[in-house]
Image: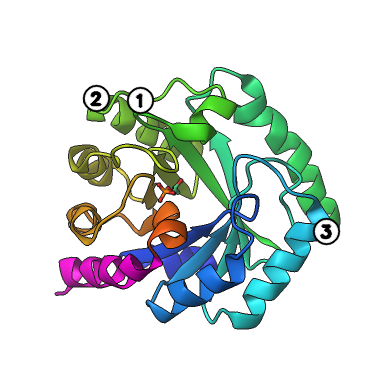
Amino acid sequence: MKVLEYISEGVKHFTLLDPDKSVDYLKIAKTALDAGTDGLLVGGSLGIPSEELDEVVKDLKSVAHVPVVLFPGTICQITPRADAILFLSVLNSQDPYFIVGAQLQGAVILAKHYPQLEVISTAYLLVGDGGAAGYISSARPIPLRRPDIAVAYALAARYMGFNAVYLEAGSGAPEPVPTAMVRAVRKYLDRVLIVGGGIRSGKAAEEIARERPNVIVTGTIAEEQPEKLGEIVRSIRSAVKP
Ligand code: 1GP
């Protein structure tokens, strides 16, 4: 099954592993897999050498029975060992490089060298704090109280043909993407919706899951309080139980 198809069904939990931050990525991944995470995202705002990324993804693939998906912060974060890549365009960046510049460089690498890698075109929208991703990509984050602006961007992404929209509060953000914003975007978006950033509790994950995004991503919690991952995964499952 293609990864896009897999994430289109239900509400899944993905664990973000940032190899630049976590030396213990394999340990974190195993904890997340034991907790029942549905997939692993690999990447971060700052790069690591591509040979290292290759090794990281190889290691993760050896333990994971779920998809391993690239979440590149730079064009160096591409390896054919992953199952898919979120081909990100930061639609609310003020710098064309992050909207289409890096993408044209990355597209050539993908087409020439790794045509087998599944590509999931993703409109990446920074919200609220925006974190390191927002800072580095020169984004003008969507204010937390303006779900209408998020909807406008999501509609633009849909009409532009993106496979997915990713609402990102930023890694370690003080608060997650507001549920009202997720609800508003879900209402208009008939594509994959991914939500992440600042989710630290089962309650926060459950509230977001009730709005039926397709993927909820947590990263920091896996590094700082891995014991909470089980609670987060269970909360998502119980929120969407028929
Ligand atoms: C993925 O950046 C997030 O979208 C991860 O955020 O580290 O705050 O969980 P946290």
Mark 3 or mark 1, which has the lower sequence index? 3
Mark 2: is the Cβ under 8 angstroms from ligand 1? no
Give the image quarter of residue 202: bottom left
Residue 140 spot, x, y in % from top left = 45, 20
Is 195 located above or below residue 8 in the figure?
A: above
Instruction: Specify the amino acid type for callout 2.
Output: Arg
Q: Is the C terminus in the top left, top right, bottom left or bottom right quadrant?
A: bottom left
Alpha-carbon span between mark 3 and mark 1? 35 Å
User: 238 left or right of 121?
Assistant: left
Q: Residue at left 76%, top 46%?
A: 76
Q: Which residue is mark 1?
A: 142
Quarter of the rendering containing residue 185: top left
The disc placed on residue 51 is 3
Under tag 1, what secondary structure? loop
**Is residue 158 depicted above or below 50 in this figure?**
above
**First of labels 2, 3 by sequence position:** 3
> Looking at numbered disc 1 in the image, what kind of residue is underneath it?
Ile
Residues at marks 2 and 3, CA–CA distance in whole angstroms:
41 Å
Residue 234 lies in the magenta stretch: yes
- What segment carries the magenta color? 226-242
Left or right: 39 in relation to 18: left
Camera sees residue 174: yes
Amino acid on which disc 3 is placed: Glu
- Residue 115 shows in the view: no
Q: Tags 1 and 2 in contact by the CB under 8 Å rule?
A: yes
Q: Nearer the viewer, residue 164 or 76?
A: 76
